[in-house]
């Protein structure tokens, strides 16, 4: 779904929606993953998104917060229902200007909340990402060699 919203605003909303309850560190880790997808120079994100932040955010089936319907049910937690606060814009600007969360690192391309104390070893389940670390409730994943062929 595309709106007239500018990219910075959309990024701030995505950060709030995806990690607003994870504190500043968790929001920066999620923002780092988004920007890692912008900067990666191989694989699906490079091929499909061409280094464009807006394309990364709007890529189909990547962020549940970009969907107004999940599993056939309305999704009230979406970017269009979010009103970002100053902290969300600050984190977005930090990431756009080159900030990298040291815990998530410069390679992580995926994160997920497993709603479980244990992170799955691979993500997505096709094993293109391997578990790297956990920050608050989110598990972070670096690409495997197989990702380069996506």
Image (tube, rainbow, N blue to C red):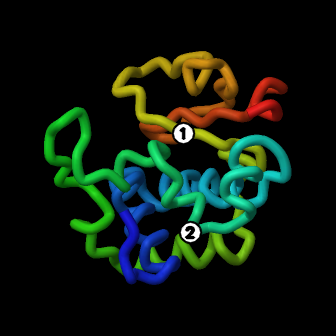
Q: Secondary structure at mark 1?
A: strand
User: Relative to 124, does residue 16 appear above or below in the rendering?
Assistant: below
Q: Which mark is residue 15?
A: none
Q: In the rendered view, does 116 fall on the left or right side of 110?
A: left
Q: Residues within 10 Å of mark 1 (few under 14, many from 20)?
A: many
- Give the residue at x 55% y 19%: 125
- Give the residue at x 51% y 79%: 8
User: Relative to 113, does residue 105 appear above or below in the rendering?
Assistant: below
Location of the C terminus (image quadrant): top right
Q: Residue tagged by mark 2?
A: 54
Q: Secondary structure at mark 2?
A: helix
Which mark is first along the chain, 1 or 2?
A: 2
- The image position of residue 50, as x and y in percent, is 74, 61
How far apart, in angstroms, are the residues tagged by discs 2 and 1?
Answer: 18 Å
The quarter holding residue 149 reads top right
- The image position of residue 127, as x and y in percent, is 65, 19
Q: Residue tagged by mark 1?
A: 111
- Give the residue at x 36% y 75%: 3
User: Relative to 20, does residue 107 appear above or below in the rendering?
Assistant: above
Residue 101 is at least partly visible in this image: no
User: As rendered, which of 95 and 80 lies closer to the eye?
Assistant: 80
Q: Are marks 2 and 1 in contact (CB under 8 Å)?
A: no
User: As rendered, which of 74 and 84 lies closer to the eye?
Assistant: 74
Location of the N terminus (image quadrant): bottom left
User: As rendered, which of 134 and 79 lies closer to the eye?
Assistant: 79
User: As rendered, which of 1 and 30 lies closer to the eye?
Assistant: 1
Residue 33 is at least partly visible in this image: yes
Which one is closest to the eye, mark 2 or mark 1? 2
């Amino acid at each position: 779904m595309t709106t007239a919203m500018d990219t910075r605003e959309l990024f701030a909303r995505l950060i709030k929606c995806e990690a607003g309850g994870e504190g500043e560190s968790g929001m920066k880790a999620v923002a780092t993953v988004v920007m890692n997808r912008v900067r990666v120079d191989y694989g699906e994100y490079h091929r499909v998104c061409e280094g464009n932040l807006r394309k990364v955010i709007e890529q189909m089936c990547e962020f549940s917060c970009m969907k107004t319907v999940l599993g056939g049910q309305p999704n009230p937690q979406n970017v269009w229902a979010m009103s970002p606060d100053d902290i969300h814009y600050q984190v977005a600007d930090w990431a756009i200007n080159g900030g990298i969360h040291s815990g998530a690192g410069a390679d992580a391309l995926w994160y997920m909340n497993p709603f479980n104390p244990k992170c799955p070893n691979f993500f997505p389940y096709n094993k293109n990402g391997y578990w790297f670390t956990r920050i608050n409730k989110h598990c972070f994943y670096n690409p495997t060699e197989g990702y380069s062929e996506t």
